[in-house]
Amino acid sequence: MASPVWHPFTQHGLNEPIPRVTRAEGAVLHLADGGTLIDGISSWWVTTHGHCHPRIAAAIAEQAGTLDQLIFAGYTHDPAEAVAHELVRLAPRAPDRPALSHVFFSDSGSTAVEVALKMALGHWYNRALDGGPAARSRILVLEHSYHGDTIGTMSVGERGVYNRAWSPLLFDVGTIPFPAAGREAAALAALEAACADRDDPPAAFIVEPLVLGAGGMLVYPASVLRSMARICARYGVLLIADEVMTGWGRTGTLFACEQAGVVPDIMAVAKGITGGAIPLAATLATGAIFDAHSSTDRARLFYHSSSYTANPIACAAAAANLAIWREEDVLGRIANLSAEMATRLDRLAAHPAFANPRQLGVIAAIDLIAADAGYLSDLAPALRAFFLERGLLLRPLGNTIYLMPPYCLTIGQLDGIFAALHAAGDRFGAQA
């Protein structure tokens, strides 16, 4: 009997194999047929310390027997309070910027960003009600960006085949060119011109700090992010940092914004917030954003929620994850793994089938030279099958092969991954 399951980002018409995974530990997935896979992409960038981490699993089990669910509208619980306080403590800080002091919980990266957009627009709307400047509604985005799959987050992402069917629902945005090497000044000039528009001043600029994930693992310097933040501050444009993918150590620091000394007005986090064990997300905001929604007028409250906002079990997992960050040298593990990845990426870059190697922290990517480069390159399904045969979970973005492993990956497992990458260059480079 055919499975009734409809999988995300899967073209079922191609009848590609869908392995059944029965259990996991560390960086290894165990399959129903007895095989194993090394998880080279942290199961869509969420697993940080490794699958089924004992401390996180124990916290989930304990909380499930104590308090499993609670309406969060007007009620609270200890796990949520603990996580919120720790997030505020860990958030990026700078002496000349207001702190991220308030935490709004949700359940995925897309919703965390959707919340951020609603916060930004609500901030300007409510300030206008209080006699402040006219409400602003225009959002600026960075070219090639991706922020999620809800209507609002698709609107602020790159337009293309992955959202074309829903284009009538998407709102217009202003797009700033990606600051590719040699074009940084042009990107900053475009941002300044957009922010300086007196006829239609923007409400906010949303950006994936330092690395654009689904857009092709595109990397830009911390100095550019710092300049972007200064431009936004100069014109009173709110800066939204989408740290859903870049947060929790992926770029080498806990949050990517730290490398630029940037404190955004609003920051979205998800994925690794629970170590990848269970869904949870949060949107952090400054006091000014919170205060714009705080009033004796009940009509001015922030209208957003979901049934499972701040679910106690998810918050318990996040609290256990935060304890691991607090008590263990996670950044040291990341630095060691990053250095090992860099050595092997340098050797792979010498292969004639590859181009444009790039790395930041434990995010590494390289392009397999192809006639049909891009997200819909025919190389993508062929590469997925090639790696699957070799016991690897890798999911190339078109002809871009990337790694984003959990921090427990061993040197032997890393060597196995790069051996497969070299073999892929031999196999598919010849075809190109």
Image (cartoon, rainbow, N blue to C red):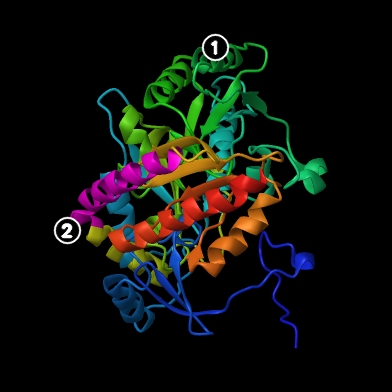
Q: Is residue 347 magenta?
A: yes
The picture quadrant where one finds residue 386 is bottom right
| Residue at the spot 55% in from the left edge and 13% down from the top edge | 186
- Please provide percent x and percent y for residue 178: 56, 26
Q: Which mark is residue 18?
A: none
Q: Nearer the viewer, residue 251 or 207?
A: 251
Check disc 2: other Cα within 10 Å, few if <14, some if 14-19, many if 20+.
few
| Residue at the spot 36% in from the left edge and 47% down from the top edge | 362
The quadrant of the image that shows the C terminus is top right
State the SS at label 1: helix
Residues shaded magenta:
325-349
Say whether residue 15 is left or right of residue 144: right
Report the amino acid beneath label 2. Answer: Glu
- Please provide percent x and percent y for residue 6: 71, 70
Q: Which mark is residue 327?
A: 2
Q: Which mark is residue 189?
A: 1
State the SS at label 2: helix
Q: Nearer the viewer, residue 290 or 280?
A: 280
Tell me if I can see residue 267 in this picture: no
The quadrant of the image that shows the N terminus is bottom right
Q: Is residue 175 magenta?
A: no
- Please provide percent x and percent y for residue 416: 39, 61
Q: Distance between the Cα atoms at labels 2 and 1?
A: 43 Å
Q: Compared with residue 327, is residue 134 higher up or lower down, i.e. above or below?
A: above
- Please provide percent x and percent y for residue 111: 56, 52
**Count of picture labels:** 2
- First along the sequence among labels 2 and 1: 1
